[in-house]
Image: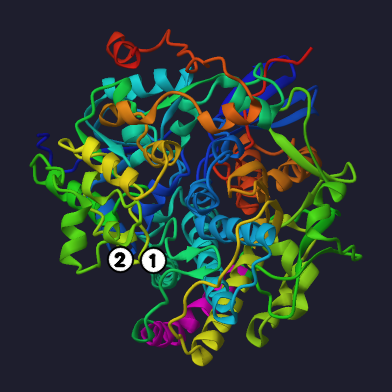
Amino acid sequence: MVKNKKLKIGIFSFTSCAGCQFEILDLEDELLDLFTKANIAHFPMAKAENDEGDFDVAFVEGAITTKKEAIEVRKIRKKTKYVVALGTCASYGGVPSIKDFYTEEEIEVPVYKSTKVIKSIRADGIANYVKVDYFMHGCPPNKYEFLHVMKELMVGKTPRQPDYPVCKECRENKNPCLLQQGKACMGPITNGGCDSVCTNCGIPCKGCRGPIEDANIDRIVKLYEKMGFSNEDIKRFFRGYAGTSKIFAKVVGQTCDIRQRKLGKTTKTTKKSAKSTTKSKKSKKRRKK
Amino acid sequence: MALIKTKGNKTIKLNHITKIEGHAKLSIKIEKNKLKRVKLDVYESARFFESLIMCRKYTELSPLTSRICGTCSPSHAITSLMATEDAFGVKVSKQTDVLRDLLLYGTTIQNHVMHLCLLAMPDYFGYESAIAMASKHKDKVLMGLNLKKLGNELVTVVGGREIHPITAVVGGFSKIPEKERLKDLLIKFKKAKKLAKASVDLFAKLKYPNFKRETQAFGLTNKTHSFHKGKINCVGGICFQEKDYNTIFDEHVKKGSTAKVVLYKGKPFFNGALARLQVNGNSLSKDASKYLNKIDFENPYHNNIAQAVEVLHSFDRIIEILETLKPKQEDVVDYKVKAGRGVAITEAPRGLLLHDYTISKDGFCRHSNIITPTAQNLKQMEEDLKLMIPSLLNKPESVLKRQVEMLIRAYDPCFSCSSHFLEWDIERS
């Protein structure tokens, strides 16, 4: 990877709750050391003077939800050697991407009374627009993973992503299996690395770290069905954090069925059309069914 | 800062206000040395949270709305639970109440200290960031980091992790914190109390710009300065029921503005630490209340002192709670899912936070409204700037810029919180 004595780092933020940046600032014990050993040149949330110039590493937080952001993220890619998607929004679109399964009208009218006031496009992870070198999953990501990635990059190594499901850590932590208790846990198909923080508290995994590559989706859907969850329930589970992920595509469907039924509409609704002048052909292709 | 000058006129643009949570920009227009226009634009992209949680099950509302804001996520999570419980008519146990109190005191420390020591303090010592400041004032930066760490630890022990808490659920907690860890926290909080005191001393002594304005303050009133219980009140006193909030506050989008703003009887008002101390000051702990006389409630910059005082109060309350709390294993209370509307108002670190849900009989959210503190403070910030800038017009640009940024920062605005904010440039016919 990049071999530099002092890496020049930029931390950028798009549509998000800023939680991933806070996760960095929550490294109280290591923060000062980190900032002296690396040149954190761009970090508008914590610094008044921000360098716009080339970077060795960029950590990008948040989903892309406007055309402007799409342009911006491409600019960042151009001037950066190694791009890290920081958190689930940047990796998959995260919670904001729930809106992708609704029509523009359904999403915008309840809040703003009209669809004309918003210049919003689909919410997607940054990988739909630029090449990403490392996906740091999680809502929020694990701050120690951030530290680990930083250390690896600083010594010139290419960091490796955890490649095991949440179940591994959950077993190590000796938690009782929530699936066996009839709870819809997404642990078996979700990227590990979080130290199974939710299941440690008895709360089923919601899949915030996105699907592992070889996730056996059919099997888990069958299991949920057997446990008595309806189709709509299952769709909702998958539409929470990483609904835009390719691996989930066959489960998540396109629109919000519950509301359609309530409104008594039987006409099929189209997925919010992607206003994609700024989008790459590749991502367009992916979006087409 | 971009400065565009034409014959006696100038426009000052702060294109990205730094060291705040989220994205905002400010443009000031000056014509013939007279202030023509001040516009605070929020360019945080709209996230439609109210729509996102529609037709979601009631159990998902708290984790999802927690994602509105990374910094005060416990506040959103708890407010959401309380609104849901209000709709179902759930009454939680005393222990749950106390643990929620702890969680909110913890997040108050997280937020206030982050704002005070990492974002605001460097301004007053002439540095661009806390990191730059650490070279000469390492003790002060470390003090902040150590205080913040304790807030994080408390939220982690009670809530499961420091951001987006896990354990708080409708009717109680999925996991009761372990006795040992609470004991350990008590020792740490007792030991670090002198740091909290030192930080109030520090912020009370700083030199703040001399700027005064009169306006209305809103906050919760209760006996322990708790962040999730009490009546909504203001100076002069108008208590109202939570469900009636829309008769007191009106949320609207002004033509040409980029954000939804909240007004009280058509006028701007403010909330947050300074407002809370003004409305509910006599509920502070003994040590914290000693500093009340250092605060000028008409000076918005004093929100910094108010936050430091609240950190000290939170320390006192946390120590008091931890000393008496004997955590016992208990299940969440029994409740029945039923149709209804639930409203909850709490004090998030930055001010009043409201969640209003209408839930159908099968437990799905059918309508919701969320009002965040920054939406309420936004108009007041703009008004303050209008009042303050004319007195600074003859000063050098750098002084003007600094003082303006410091004022915005003093409110500790959180634009990512404001699920409502949007860029508004197409007029409605």
The residue at the point 50 percent across, 63 percent down is B169
Task: Measuring from the top left, give residue A56's x and y in whole percent.
Answer: 21, 33
Task: Measuring from the top left, give residue B332's x and y in whole percent.
Answer: 50, 72
Question: Residue beneath label 1, please?
Answer: B160
Q: Quadrant of the N terminus of chain A?
A: top left
Left/right of residue B40 with respect to residue B280 in the rendered view: left
Q: How is the image coloured?
A: rainbow
Q: Which residues are magenta?
A: B182-203
Task: Measuring from the top left, give residue B187's x and y in whole percent.
Answer: 40, 88
Question: Residue beneath label 2, please?
Answer: A200
Residue B194 counted in the magenta span: yes
Per the model, the C-alpha gap separating discs 1 and 2 is: 8 Å
The residue at the point 61 percent across, 44 percent down is B365
Give the SS element for disc 2.
helix
Callout 1: chain: B
Position above or below: B325 against B391: below
Left/right of residue B44 with respect to residue A63 in the rendered view: right
Please rate how many residues cluster around mark 1, counting C-alpha atoms within 10 Å: few if below 14, some from 14 to 19, many from 20. many
- The answer to whether residue A204 of the structure is visible from this angle is yes
Q: Quadrant of the C terminus of chain A?
A: top left
Callout 2: chain: A
Tags 1 and 2 touching, CB below 8 Å: yes
Q: Quadrant of residue B334?
A: bottom right
Give the SS element for disc 1.
loop
Q: The disc labelled 1 sits on which kind of residue?
A: Gly
Magenta stretch, main secondary structure, is: helix
The residue at the point 54 percent across, 50 percent down is B61
Q: Quadrant of residue A277?
A: top left
